[in-house]
């Protein structure tokens, strides 16, 4: 099962080309086809894990400047290293999703498309809620959260010591930013993306 992400910039005329910055932010994620510039101010990449697709989508949302489309579906084999040489229904779904994300005018411009449209809509709703949490965090909160590891115990004191702040300040930032709730919800979003693959039906051509 593959997940294609098509991510294009919202305001390149105002802030300039942000594609290199996004690619650097996504570089640590495991991919089938590495995130790369596809055309203009657009980035595309392919992953084989729903949880990685969630990670990538939220990285883009964190940066505030991107429309995010997630397509759940196959690519033609062999899968190339260059996204421009790829084909398949995963790309079709991702294109549909990002086009819809651009047109909705939502604060969190993210959409999901795949064989099971109903489940795709559910995955999209959960991801937008997660995106809202990520989107509204402050730089001060990110300074703390970027040092945190999900599921690790006793780390708030270590983070406080590293940053030279009180443990109470770290605790308040974690609570205020809904960090625990975010990481508790990510598996549900990933599960819905997996289920979006649904039956082996193919997309109907747009009219």
Image (spheres, rainbow, N blue to C red):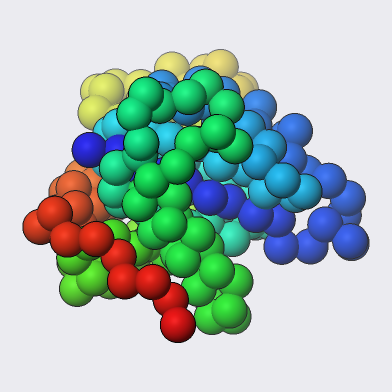
Is residue 200 toward the left or the right of residue 55 in the image? left
Q: Position of residue 69 (x, y in %)?
A: 48, 57
Q: Position of residue 159 (x, y in %)?
A: 48, 23
Q: Residue at x 13, y 54 (%)?
A: 200
Q: Is residue 148 or residue 204 the one in the foreground? A: 204
Q: Residue at x 56, y 41 (%)?
A: 44
Task: Name above or below for residue 80 compared with residue 183.
Answer: above
Which quarter of the rendered picture does the C terminus lie within?
A: bottom left
- Residue 115: quadrant of the picture: bottom left
Q: Is residue 106 visible?
A: yes
Q: Residue at x 19, y 53 (%)?
A: 197
Task: Name above or below for residue 44 compared with residue 188.
Answer: above
Is residue 14 toward the left or the right of residue 129 in the image? right
Q: Position of residue 64 (x, y in %)?
A: 65, 56
Q: Residue at x 58, y 79 (%)?
A: 103
Q: Position of residue 170 (x, y in %)?
A: 47, 37
Q: Is residue 25 visible?
A: no
Is residue 111 toward the left or the right of residue 48 in the image? right
């Amino acid at each position: 099962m593959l997940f294609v992400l098509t991510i294009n910039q919202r305001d390149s005329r105002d802030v300039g080309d942000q594609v290199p910055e996004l690619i650097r932010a996504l570089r640590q994620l495991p991919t089938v086809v590495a995130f790369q510039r596809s055309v203009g101010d657009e980035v595309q990449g392919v992953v084989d894990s729903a949880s990685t697709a969630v990670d990538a989508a939220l990285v883009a949302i964190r940066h505030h400047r991107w429309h995010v489309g997630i397509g759940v579906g196959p690519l033609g084999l062999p899968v190339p290293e260059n996204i421009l040489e790829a084909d398949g229904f995963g790309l079709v779904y991702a294109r549909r999703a990002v086009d819809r994300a651009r047109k909705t005018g939502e604060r969190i411009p993210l959409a999901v498309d795949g064989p099971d449209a109903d489940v795709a809509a559910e995955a999209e709703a959960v991801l937008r809620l997660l995106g809202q949490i990520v989107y509204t965090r402050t730089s001060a909160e990110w300074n703390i959260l970027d040092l945190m590891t999900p599921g690790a115990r006793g780390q708030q004191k270590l983070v406080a010591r590293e940053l030279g702040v009180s443990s109470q300040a770290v605790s308040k930032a974690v609570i205020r930013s809904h960090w625990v709730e975010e990481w508790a919800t990510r598996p549900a979003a990933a599960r819905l993306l997996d289920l979006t693959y649904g039956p082996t039906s193919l997309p109907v051509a747009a009219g």
